[in-house]
Image (cartoon, grey):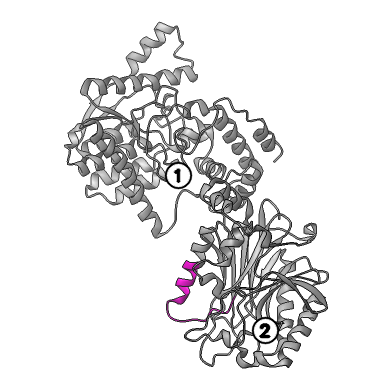
Amino acid sequence: MKYGFVKVASAIPSVRVADCEYNVKHIITLLLQAEEEGVEAVVFPELCITSYTCQDLFSQQLLLEQAEIQLMQLLNATLKLNVVAIVGLPVAYKGTLLNCAAVIQGGKLLGLVPKSYLPNYKEFYEMRWFTPALNLTNTTVHLAGQTVPLGPKMLFEAAGFNFGVEICEDMWAPIPPSSLLTLHGADIIFNLSADNDAIGKHQYLKGLISQQSARCICGYVFSGCGFGESTQDIVFSGKALIYENGQLLNEGKRFSLDEQLVISEIDIDRLRTERRVNTTFASSVAQLNDTKEFYHIHVEQNLNELSFKLTRYIDPHPFVPIGPELDERCKEILNIQVSGLAKRLTHIHGKTVVIGISGGLDSTLALIVCVRTFDLLGYNRRGIVGITMPGFGTTDRTYTNATNLMKFLGITIREISISEAVRQHFHDLGIDPSVHDTTYENCQARERTQILMDAANQMGGLVIGTGDLSELALGWATYNGDHMSMYGVNASVPKTLVRHLVVWSANHIDNDNCRMTLLDIADTPISPELVPADEHGNIQQKTEDLVGPYELHDFFLYHFMRYGFPPAKIYVLAKKAFEHVYDNVTIKHWITTFFSRFFQQQYKRSCLPDGPKIGSCSLSPRGDWRMASDADSTAWILQCDKL
C-alpha cells in the first residue's frame, strides 16, 4: 500500500464447464498479469476452478479430486508471487459440500470462506449440492496438502489493509456477512459471484453494491462469472465492478468473449477517516459481541517488489459534478440557500435586505439568492437594496455589470462612492494614499461594510454576506470588513462552484439582457478591485495571481477537510488530477500557500456570521470546523517543504 492506496482487481477468466485444468491455467494467466500490474489482491468468480454451472457433476468424486489437484497447481504457481488471489471451488467437509472462496498468497492457502446463504429459488438450486455455512463455526480442514482455517468469520490482515470475503447471494441477504466483516475491521470486501443476467438486474446489482459499500464505508470488489459457463437456461455476462464508499471506480465490459482484469486503487486512508468521523459506525462497532469468534489471518507480502502507479480517476474539481448531475446540483444548492434566507427573514419579520453589489461573482450569486427568496415569499423585489460602492479600483466593466444587473432584476438601487470617505480616513490616520499596501486595501473594504451596516440600520434591513467558502479557507477577506454580515448565504459555496451557479442562473432566466450580464460577470477575472486599474482601464489586481488558482485551493481544501489527508497525499492526488495543467513546482508552491494561510487565518473563521451549509465541507465554527485560532502549522508546512 502506497499513499494509502491498495491496488485491487476483479478478474473474469475464460472457463470450461467441469474442466479444472483449463480453468486454472487461465486463472494463472490473469494472476501473472495482475502481479505485473502491481495488484495486491485480485478476486475471481464463484466456483471458478470447476465453473459454477456443473450442476449434478458437483456430486461426482472425480470433479472434487480434480478441483483439489488443480488448486495445488495454483498454489505452486503463486510461490513467488506477492499478489493475493481469491478463487472459488467446492470443498468437501464432514459429509457435506461447501461452496468456498480460497484465499491464496505466496503458495499458501491462507483460509477457506464458505458461502453462508444459498439461493434455492427460481433458476437457483444450490441446496441440491451445497450446505450453507450459517451454522458453521470456524474450524480447520486439510486440503491440497495444507491444514487450512475454514469458516465464515475470517478477517485477513495484509500490509496496511484488512479484507473480508463473501460469496454472491451473501450480499443479497438482509444482514450480509460483509456488514459484520467491516465492523470487525475489514476495509475491503471481495465478492466471488455467479450472478446471471436478466433485464434490469444489472442496474439493481450495481445499486446494491453501491449501497453496501456506502453503508459499510468500505471498498467492494465484485467478480461475476463470464463467457464459458453453461447457457443451458441462464446467461452470465461477466461482471467486474470496483466500488469505494458508494462510488464506482472501475467496471469491466459485459458480454465480452475476452478475459478481463479490471484494476483500480482503493483509498484506505479515505475509508478509515470516514469511519472515524462517522460516530454511527463507531457505535455499531461497540455493539459487537462476537469478537472472539473471528479468525484474524496474517497475509505476508513483500510490497517493495510491487510497482505502483495511480490509475484511478482523480476529479480535479471535486465540488463540481459533471454531466446532467450539475444541473440538478445547482438547483439544489440555490434552493438550500433560498430556504435558509427565507427562514431568517420570516423569523425576524423582515422584508428588507441590503447587499453590496460589485459586479463580481460572489455578490451576483448572493443577489440571485435574495431575488429567488423574495419571489418565494411573495415579497416585493424593491425590498432588496443593492448598493454599489465604487472606489479607487472599480473598473467600468464591473460597475456597468453591477448597475445593469440590479436594473434588470428590478431591485432598489443605491450608489454610494467610498472615495471621499476613504481619503478623509487616510488623512485622519496619516496614511500615504500612494502606498497601495494592506492598510490601503482594508480601509476600503471596511468603509464598504460600514456603509452596508449603517444603511441596513437606516432601512430596518439585513446585510447579506457575499463571501464564499474558498475565501474563508484562505482568509481572503478583510477582518470586520467584507468578512462580516448578518447572514452569509455563500459561506459554504466554494469558488469553483460559484461560477457554475451564476451561469446556471443565466441559462434559467427569461430576460435576455440579464442573461448576457450574468454571463459577462461569470467571464470577468476575479478581483477585490482595491487597487487602481491599469492604463487601459482593465482590472490590475487579480486574486488568483496573488493567492493562487482557486481550482487548486478548492482541491486542497476538499481533501484536507473531507478526508483529513496530509499535504504529501494531497500533493500526489493533485499531480494526478492536474497532470496536464500545472507542473509539480507550481502545485507545491500553492499547496504550501494554502496550508500557511489556512492556519494563519483561522481567527476570521472563529467568529463567522450565520449561513447555510450546502455541501460536505463547511467552515462554520458552529458546524463542521472547530479549530483553535492559534493552532500551529509547523508539521504541515514541514511536510510541504519536503514534497
**Residue 15 on image: x %, y %:** 65, 85
Amino acid type of the residue tagged 1 in the rendering: Thr
Which of the two labelled residues, at mark 1 and mark 2, occupies the earlier sequence position? 2
Whether residue 204 is in magenta: the answer is yes
The image's mark for residue 105 is none
Q: Using the rendered image of the protein, determine whether residue 579 is visible from the camera's viewpoint.
A: no
Where, by quadrant of the figure, is residue 461 drawn? top left
Q: Residue at x 40, y 41 (%)?
A: 613
Q: Is residue 417 above or below residue 135?
A: above
Q: Which numbered disc covers residue 496?
A: 1
Q: Is residue 41 shown to the viewer in this render?
A: yes
Q: Residue at x 73, y 59 (%)?
A: 158
In the rendered image, residue 75, in percent from the top left (x then y), is placed at 79, 76
Asked if marks 1 and 2 touch (Cβ < 8 Å), the reply is no
Report the residue at 47% width, 67% height from top. Answer: 207
Vertical placement of residue 404 versus 106, above or below = above
Of tags 1 and 2, the one toward the viewer is 2
Which quadrant of the rendered structure holds the C terminus? top right
Question: In the figure, residue 232 lies in which quadrant?
Answer: bottom right
* Residue located 67% across and 70% down the image: 137
Q: Residues within 10 Å of mark 2 (few under 14, many from 20)?
A: few
Q: Which residue is mark 2?
A: 96
Q: How far across and down, in percent of the image, does residue 635 sit?
A: 67, 33
Residue 488: x, y in percent? Answer: 36, 33
**Numbered range of the magenta stretch:** 193-208
